[in-house]
Amino acid sequence: MGLSKLTNRWQGSQTTADRSGQSTLPFRVRAINLGLRFSWVVVVVLVIETARLDVMSQQPAWAAILGVAAMLGALSLIRWRNVLDRPIGTVLLWLWAAVILVALAAALSIEELSQAMLTVYLVMIVFVAVIGKTGTVVTVTVAAAGSYAVIPVLAGHTRSFGSLVVPLIALVAIAIIAKSLTNAYSSSVAHGRRQSDELARQETNFERLYEVSRTIASGDRLNNVLPELVGKIGSYLDAEVGVVLMRQENSPTLEVLSPIWAAGHTLEVAGYKIGLRTSDPLAKVYMTSKPTMFESLRSDPDRNGILGELGVDNAMAVPMRVEGQTIGVLVLGDRHTGKFDSGDLLDFVSLAAPASLVLAHIDRYEEAAETSRKMEELARMKTDFVSVVSHELRTPLTGIIGSLATLARPELTPERPAAKELLTSARNQADRLRRLIEDLLMVSRIENQTLPQQPSKIKLFPFLRDMINVVPGAADLVTSKVHEEAETIEADPDQLQRVLINLVQNAIKYARGSKIEIVVAPRRAHQVAIAVIDHGPGISAEKRSAVFDRFTQLEPAATRSQGGTGLGLHIVKGLTQSLGGTVDVTDTPGGGATFVVVIPRSPGAVPPDSIRLL
């Protein structure tokens, strides 16, 4: 199924609200409405003035008043918001100006009304300066000044030079001042509106960026995050279709990531790729790293590659860049209303930046998770291999050790000293190999969590005495002290004995004949601390964090005088954790190392939360 069939299934099913929102009444419309109300006041004042001057019976007065009133009534019925910026609005304004000028000229022919008409002229010029353009203001001012100067002369009125020039100067000055103030106010309003719109746009963009960035916490898989991420950006920009194409590693291609987003739904796709060396428009966007808008795509879908397959008519594509590298292309197609514009493209670019970070982060996370999974699988295979090999080696080794023990019997012991020395060396090496195999098997059980747990009551004083007798050379070096309140615990005796034997053997090996102490003390109500204290050279601070790692030995291999596998302390840590406890190493006052094992008094007790020698 083509991409166009997939996306067209959902196209046209969604509607969106008007992106522009509810606009406010324009300043010029408010000015017209205010001017019309004020003009009615002027008509009333004109009626009162004609009545006061007793010129109501003169025909020009009636004509002026009726003309102005009729024109104001007609203008008051017009919906200026709908016609002001259209050609009909300009025609109506000029018609209004012409009628008002004629009416005022008629009234101006009455000498008694000349002063009142000057006031009306001034009001009219102010009004025109507020609502009209500069050319209109100049025309109306010239017409008003001309009629004010000529009409009285034609009517036979006599005027002094001062009574004529001063009003004309006043008309021109008022026109200039009113238009200047209006322009300044309009500029201030426009600037404030632009700032308000810019702040609103920035606030919207910040909110969108925040929501887009939050998707990084919505999941750890690309196919879970991708629909939400693209869907958010698509809904913000009123798009019906959203697609992400990512560069394939070690391949000059872009692949459409599945799923794609179409009108609020997710659609699974697979196998859609484009070569970066082709003429596909999206390949060019990737190669040039330039945001691009596309229009009239349906007119020739075959030339438009993936965009043609999507079945969209107009689209936007922006490169996704992370750390200076282009990693893919983000595409939105078909606005619900109209076409995408340059503002949409700018918003798309700003939203694509965090989207690129999210996709790159998840892609790297999935790669790291896959690597981690493979490493875990390799570690498990290695552990299984070691376990199998150790089991297989133990059987023949047992036979070898038994044979060497038989040869060591007095009646079979070779008489030659060299042969006896070789036999003793073989027995020692066989025992060492046996211990290595046992350690490897123990590590395998610890890592696979297959250690059997058989807890029982343990009296620590006799338990420690028996353990010391088991370790060769420990009886003369090791002393034990058990606090009365820590005498009895419940734990697996075999595991605890292995822990203490390893610690004592480690102390004997590195303390070089110094005294070793085992101190048992209570730790709170539910814990017991067992400290193995030696007075040897101690362990440097930089090596303490590694002493419990596998195959770690404190002496360099070239100068190591003590044998060992480097598994003893690792086994100690694993067995202690199996007992529900923890182990740590600190300095012994005066020199040496102190290993502290903290275990619960019984398997059901609260696990320890810290390690500190009491």
Image (tube, rainbow, N blue to C red):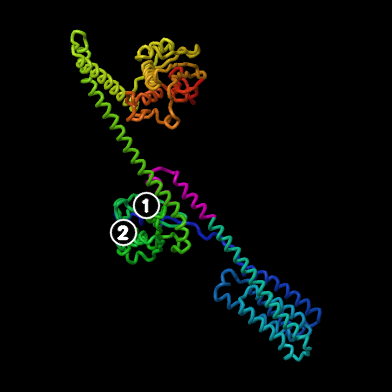
Q: Label 2: few (<14), some or many (≥20) within 10 Å?
A: some
Which marked residue is nearer to the observer: mark 1 or mark 2?
2
Give percent across and percent down for residue 3: 32, 56
Q: Amino acid at mark 1?
A: Ile
Magenta residues (range): 203-231
Give percent across and percent down for residue 46: 75, 77
Q: Amino acid at mark 2?
A: Leu
Residue at image coords 40%, 62% = 290
Disc 2: which residue: 276
Residue at image coords 51%, 55% = 205
SS state under label 2: loop
Picture layout, residue 22 above or below residue 101? above
Q: Identify the image quadrant of residue 2.
A: bottom left
Residue 604 in view in this figure: no
Q: Is residue 29 left or right of residue 308?
A: right
Mainly helix, strand or loop, the magenta region? Answer: helix
- Residue 212 colored magenta? yes
Give percent across and percent down for residue 41: 73, 72
- Residue nearer the viewer, 243 or 72: 243
Disc 1: which residue: 260
- Residue nearer the viewer, 159 or 485: 485
